[in-house]
Amino acid sequence: MAKLFGTDGIRGEAGVFPLDTDTVFLIGRSLAARMKEKLGRKPKFVTGRDTRESGGWIETCFHSGAVSAGALCESAGVITTPGVAFVTGEFGFDLGVVLSASHNPFYDNGIKVFTPTGRKIDDELERLVESDIGAGNSGTGSSPQVTVDCSREGDFRGSYLDHLRVEQSESFLKGRRVAVDCANGAASKLAPYLLRSLGAEVLSFNDQPDGRNINEKCGSLHLDQLQTKVIETGSDLAVAFDGDADRSLFVDEKGNIVDGDATLWIMAKAMQDRGELGSGKVIATVMSNIGLEIALRSLGIELVRTAVGDKYVLEELISSGCEIGGEQSGHVIFPKESLVGDGMMTALRVFRAVTESNRPFSEAVDGFQRFPQTLVNVKVGEKKPFDEVEVIKNAADETEKILSGNGRLLLRYSGTENLARVMIEGRDQAEIENLATRLAETIKTALS
């Protein structure tokens, strides 16, 4: 059976394999059967979904398959991805299943599975499920559809919101005007309610999901609306979520974007001031700007880089015992509170840091200077490791020597095309463009 699980679960177009009715049924049945075998009892599953029109029937098919193999299933209804992860552990479920395609268009969907700790299921269980799907057998056509149990969804969502509020002082946002772009997704009802409960005057928009408008020219991938809204309304704080609200990006009171790198800077400073950054480190990916690394270094904080993907950030957070990590895209993880990126948790923490500073949001990023960046793509005939091609290795070493701590070179191959990517960051745009062009020519000559 071909590999179906990627780094973020199973994802694809709803109604098309592997998210057709029969296969979703089989996924539910396989997970239930494998967990029953492992636990020696009926497993307990909870599902949650975003606002896509396909979420309802996918949830029904999953429950039907899981129940047919002996699982006990409940639904948390429309809730964020980190909300499902929280409910799984808090209410004693064996697995939490998120039905969402995050920032993708409405016609896509996905299945992501969490353990009670908040971590995704291991590779072994994923391979077993793929094997069961490959074996096929009967699908929904020969099995009755169950009625999804939604009787406790209010309790689940309420407990999750209480969890987010627990660290915040009551009404800490009183007197603050907060603009919120909900992406017509899972945070549409939850985020405005949460912020109002803490005293904010909330101006929410893109909060009327119709099943098809999730992420449509809105949310964290399209910040222009939020920038305009901030200026029009005179908002002090502003946040945009993606469809399942596991990420958040911000806009300051002047309409400037505050991305994941700037968020890490704001939070690292605040946590260091509170004595909450005992490791003295922040985890980010190879895509984070060199400006973040240099700014953190000025505070005596080390930036540790991983491969791209929240999976790798989480692995490093756990192995190193660090307190915060994230990506430019707005996925930020606070592992002592949750092993899942949580956009609403991040928003509360960023807003708390700004309010405690008694300074405007725009001044919270002082000390962090984003360096210019250039990217050159080079067509290659083969993808040899760069270190194994002497002329490329020498050219790369020379480039890094010129940058000498005030810039950064990242060489990598495209995962889908015969392209080498030369990315350079540095203080001077003309210099880095010249360096990138020279290195690209060397790679082209050596690998064409």
Image (spheres, grey):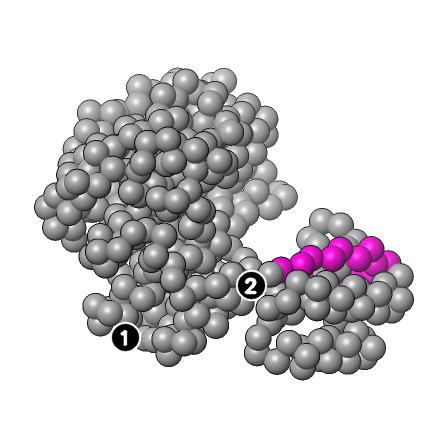
284 lies left or right of 180: right
Choose top left, top right, bottom left or bottom right for residue 265: bottom left
The magenta stretch spans residue 374: yes
156 lies left or right of 301: left
Choose top left, top right, bottom left or bottom right for residue 62: top left
Q: Position of residue 364 (x, y in %)?
A: 33, 57
The amino acid at mark 2 is Phe
Q: Secondary structure at mark 1?
A: loop
Q: Which residue is at a point 62% across and 60% down the rendered structure image? A: 373
The magenta stretch spans residue 112: no
Choose top left, top right, bottom left or bottom right for residue 411: bottom right
Residue matched to label 2: 371
Does the rendering let one see residue 84?
Answer: no
**Residue furthest left as drawn:** 170
Start and end of the magenta stretch?
A: 373-383
- Where does the N terminus fall, quadrant-wise? top right
Q: Main secondary structure of the magenta part?
A: strand
Does the rendering let one see residue 441?
Answer: yes
Residue 278: assigned label: 1
Q: Is residue 434 or residue 19 the one in the foreground?
A: 434
Q: Secondary structure at mark 2?
A: loop
Q: Position of residue 442 (x, y in %)?
A: 84, 69
Vertical side of 268 occupied by 44: above or below: above
Q: Position of residue 174 (x, y in %)?
A: 15, 41
